[in-house]
Image: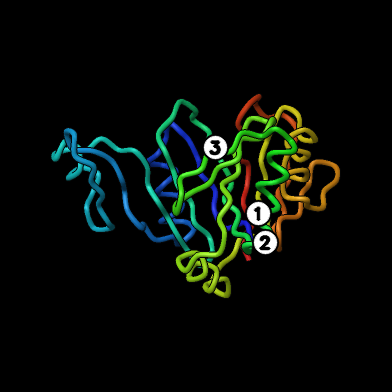
Amino acid sequence: MHLFHYHLVTSNVREVEARYLARLGFRLVARYGRIGEEQVHYEAGVSWEELERLGFRHRLSELERGAVNVVVQPGQWPLPRVDHLGVALDDEEFQEVLERATELRFRVQEYPGRRTFVATDAGYRIEVHPQRDWIDEVLANADELRLSELQLRADDPNAKASALVRLLDALGADGEVEVGEATVRFLEGGPRGRPELYAELFA
């Protein structure tokens, strides 16, 4: 089990994206969006100014470094909030998570061959992935960078952590959850619903 991805929603997309690129050394995989009715994406090298001239409507930016993948999406919150966490599982773990989601009455959204989301009862989702070649390629870069700890502010840290513990059958206590080699730590003082990004620790 590996926590390798998180999806952020913020009204300050460009600033958040710039932090990952300039300060944390991530690379821009692509910016995705629309021009008119056509879905398009642009890789690094195309500036925001040029995209504006093209009439580009931004949907999300994907950033990556080592075994960490981050997506930033436009939304209403100045401080980024987490829409979902992405967890890579082996095939047996994947099936067990889906079975537990059913037992817990967590809603499962499946996009066959692509993505599977589980909506927890704590205001955020988990994206679960069985073994796939592209994920194996990402995780193979763990020596360069991997996520050690993700700190999220929430209104009820124990409830947020409990949802993750129950779904993944993970170890957890006092608002902390062990997801593979990473720790997800929920802190007091955050908003209701989606938790707010507070800090990341990389190794």
Relative image position of residue 21 (x, y in whole percent): 41, 56
SS label for mark 3:
strand
Q: Earlier in the sequence, mark 3 or mark 1?
A: 3
Circle 2 is placed at which residue position?
92
Look at mark 3 in the image and give the residue it sits on: 83
Q: How is the image coloured?
A: rainbow
Q: Residues within 10 Å of mark 3 (few under 14, many from 20)?
A: many
The image shows residue 64, relative to residue 137, as above or below, that is above
Q: Position of residue 139 (x, y in %)?
A: 55, 68
Between label 3 and label 2, give the one nearer the viewer: 2
Q: Residue at x 59, y 59 (%)?
A: 88
Query: Which residue is drawn at the image coordinates 42% and 38% (left, top)?
Result: 73
| Tag shown at residue 16 | none
Q: CA distance from mark 3 to mark 1?
A: 23 Å
Please tell me which of labels 3 and 2 falls first in the chain. Answer: 3
Which amino acid, by three-letter code, is at mark 2? Glu
Q: Which residue is mark 1?
A: 95
Instruction: Residue 198 in the image: state x and y as whole percent.
Output: 63, 41
Judged by depth in the image, the label closer to the viewer, 3 or 1, is 1
Residue at (71% x, 63% y) in the render: 181
Q: Is residue 64 above or below residue 191?
A: below
